[in-house]
């Protein structure tokens, strides 16, 4: 019989030392600064919450949030690789990989927001069925307003927060229900992005990737 697959342990920093006892599938939970703080917070408060809420928060902290971080990093990785290929070949590649992780990112962000409404429903005793808990649901926010008005104000009366949630909805809903919005359909040039393209042209003019002595006059390294 074949040998089973085994995870190779990672060197995970704990304080000033390292431990080799951490499997790779908890990398983000212990290496990402924000995720690690959430893990520590969940461990501290678990004894004060009901088992249902503890499990909801465990799923968010140990599963959902790391998935968001991973999708974000994969978008960045394939964007970097695509840019590298474009520099060398003049052709853009890897768009499907960027698009896949891009859509996955917004799915998980919206799932996180809706999952948090279920946690709030349970913790505050709103009594709503789970299928009526939604970050965009008027019924949910009406119940929150009666039970936790400060929370409602912090979300519904803050333009910055409302605008961000609206953007998340604009990204997630088409992917779930109709034609997906991919990065090529969403990106627009700004004054800042045009400066980056100007730098690219300067770099490409020298025909080399040795940046140590490159100038924007198109001079080759060492010239």
Image (cartoon, rainbow, N blue to C red):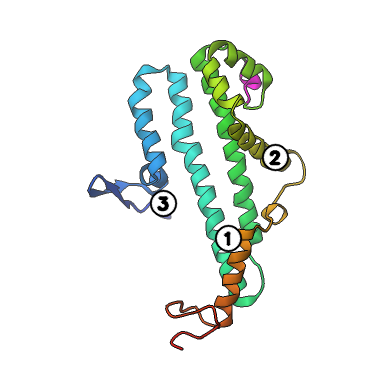
Q: Secondary structure at mark 2?
A: helix
Assess whether mark 1 and mark 2 are in contact (beta carbons under 8 angstroms). no
Using residue 98 as the reference point, say whether residue 51 is left or right of it.
left
Question: Where residue 75 sits: x, y (%)?
Answer: 56, 54
Q: Nearer the viewer, mark 3 or mark 1?
A: 1
Which residue does the numbered mark 1 point to in the structure image? 79
Question: Where residue 222 sits: x, y (%)?
Answer: 43, 87
Q: Secondary structure at mark 3?
A: loop
Which residue does the numbered mark 2 point to in the structure image? 170
Residue 85 visible in the displayed image: no
* Label 3 Cα crowd, 10 Å radius (few <14 / some 14-19 / many 20+): few
**Residue at x 58% of width, y 65% of height:** 196
Assess whether mark 1 and mark 3 are in contact (beta carbons under 8 angstroms). no
Residue 164 versus residue 216: which sits nearer the camera?
216
* Label 2 Cα crowd, 10 Å radius (few <14 / some 14-19 / many 20+): few
Residue 29 sits in which quadrant? top left
Q: Tell me the distance, in whole angstroms, between the alpha carbons under discs 3 and 2.
A: 43 Å
Q: Is residue 70 above or below residue 78?
A: above
Q: Is residue 150 above or below residue 223?
A: above
* The residue stretch that appears in magenta: 129-134
Residue 193 visible in the displayed image: yes
Residue 215 versus residue 14: which sits nearer the camera?
215
Using residue 52 as the reference point, say whether residue 186 is left or right of it.
right
Which residue does the numbered mark 3 point to in the structure image? 4
Question: Where residue 145 sits: x, y (%)?
Answer: 59, 14
Using residue 132 as the reference point, say whether residue 38 is left or right of it.
left
Q: Tell me the distance, in whole angstroms, between the alpha carbons under discs 2 and 1.
A: 22 Å
- Disc on the earlier residue, 2 or 1: 1
Residue 130 in the magenta stretch? The answer is: yes
Assess whether mark 2 and mark 3 are in contact (beta carbons under 8 angstroms). no
Q: Is residue 64 above or below residue 136?
A: below
């Amino acid at each position: 019989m074949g040998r089973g697959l085994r995870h190779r342990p990672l060197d995970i920093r704990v304080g000033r030392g390292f431990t080799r006892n951490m499997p790779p599938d908890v990398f983000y939970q212990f290496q990402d600064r924000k995720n690690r703080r959430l893990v520590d917070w969940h461990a501290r408060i678990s004894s004060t919450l009901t088992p249902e809420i503890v499990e909801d928060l465990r799923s968010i902290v140990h599963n959902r949030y790391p998935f968001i971080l991973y999708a974000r990093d994969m978008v960045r990785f394939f964007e970097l690789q695509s840019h590298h290929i474009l520099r060398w070949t003049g052709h853009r590649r890897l768009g499907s990989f960027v698009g896949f992780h891009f859509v996955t990112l917004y799915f998980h962000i919206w799932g996180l927001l809706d999952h948090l409404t279920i946690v709030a429903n349970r913790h505050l005793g709103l009594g709503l069925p789970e299928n009526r808990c939604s970050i965009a649901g008027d019924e949910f926010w009406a119940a929150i307003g009666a039970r936790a008005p400060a929370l409602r104000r912090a979300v519904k009366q803050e333009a910055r927060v409302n605008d961000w949630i609206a953007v998340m909805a604009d990204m997630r809903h088409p992917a779930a229900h109709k034609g997906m919005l991919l990065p090529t359909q969403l990106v627009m040039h700004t004054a800042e992005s045009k400066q980056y393209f100007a730098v690219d042209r300067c770099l490409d003019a020298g025909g080399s990737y040795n940046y140590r002595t490159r100038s924007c006059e198109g001079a080759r390294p060492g010239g």
